[in-house]
Amino acid sequence: MHYYLDAFTENYANIRGRATQKEFGMFLLFHFIFTFVLALFDAFLLEFESPLFFSWFFTVFYAVISFCPSFCLRVRRLHDLDHSGYWLFFFPTSCILTLYLLLVPGSCNNKYGEQPKEYKSGDKYGEYPTKCPNCGLIDIFDVECPRCGHFTPPHKRKRIQPSETTPRSSSQKSSNIPNGQTEYVCPVCKLVMDSMMPCERCGYDPLR
């Protein structure tokens, strides 16, 4: 719901930046719900010949006030796909374009801004290690592997569990800690450990 409300408040006339699939999809959902409810309400007033009704007033009024945030959201969604907002002038009411904006995942960092947080891996956007299906790198990164550049859509990413990391022998423990450092703090979950082994909490491996 907050995506819908944001479109009518802080992003009412905002055509800069990017909008995610989820943001666009949730706005469309509530937009259609409100349009349907208002249409039923107008039909109810028409049936009883209410003096408040004239020419589908509420439906038309909502269509007018929602045009600007809807248009701006489509522009930002195009930006997320690394396309110019001028596309809307060629396909202003195209159902095909709407489906394209709804179904196609966004790109990585592009000229319209950084990658939205929702495209990042992990329950809290990039805070958990994942494994690249191309080169096997296990690290904390977004949809693009920092080693090989392989692009993997967010819904196909697999979060690495602690059990999937390769444990090291006890002889490796103390020798892996940098000189002058008596303990190691996991950069992901901040767990304090006595060696630079894979983190027992989140599975992050500092030596990979």
Image (spheres, grey):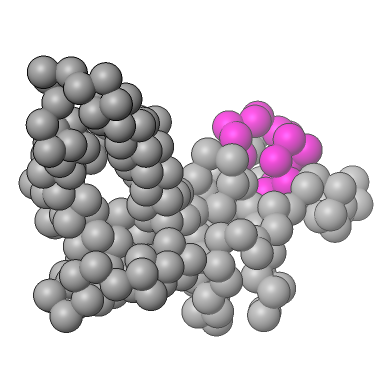
Q: Residue visible at 10% across and 31% down?
A: 54
Front residue of 89/136: it is 89
User: Which stretch is magenta?
Assistant: 186-207
Magenta segment's dominant SS is loop
Tell me if I can see residue 205 in this picture: no
Q: Position of residue 29 (x, y in %)?
A: 42, 44
Q: Position of residue 197 (x, y in %)?
A: 75, 48
Q: Position of residue 41 (x, y in %)?
A: 31, 26
> In the displayed structure, does residue 168 sit left or right of residue 179?
right
Q: Is residue 83 above or below residue 101?
A: below
Front residue of 208/49: it is 49
> In the displayed structure, does residue 205 sit left or right of residue 49?
right
The reply to whether the magenta stretch includes residue 14 is no
Q: Residue visible at 15% across and 49% down?
A: 67
Tell me if I can see residue 36 in this picture: yes
Q: Residue visible at 52% across and 49% down?
A: 126
Quarter of the picture holding the N terminus: top left
Front residue of 165/179: it is 165
Say how many tags the image has.
0
Q: Is residue 50 above or below residue 103?
A: above
> In the displayed structure, does residue 77 sit left or right of residue 177?
left
Quarter of the picture holding the C terminus: bottom right
Front residue of 71/166: it is 71
Q: Is residue 101 above or below residue 43?
A: below
Q: Residue visible at 19% across and 70% down?
A: 92
Q: Position of residue 186 (x, y in %)?
A: 61, 39
The reply to whether the magenta stretch includes residue 202 is yes
Quarter of the figure with residue 52:
top left
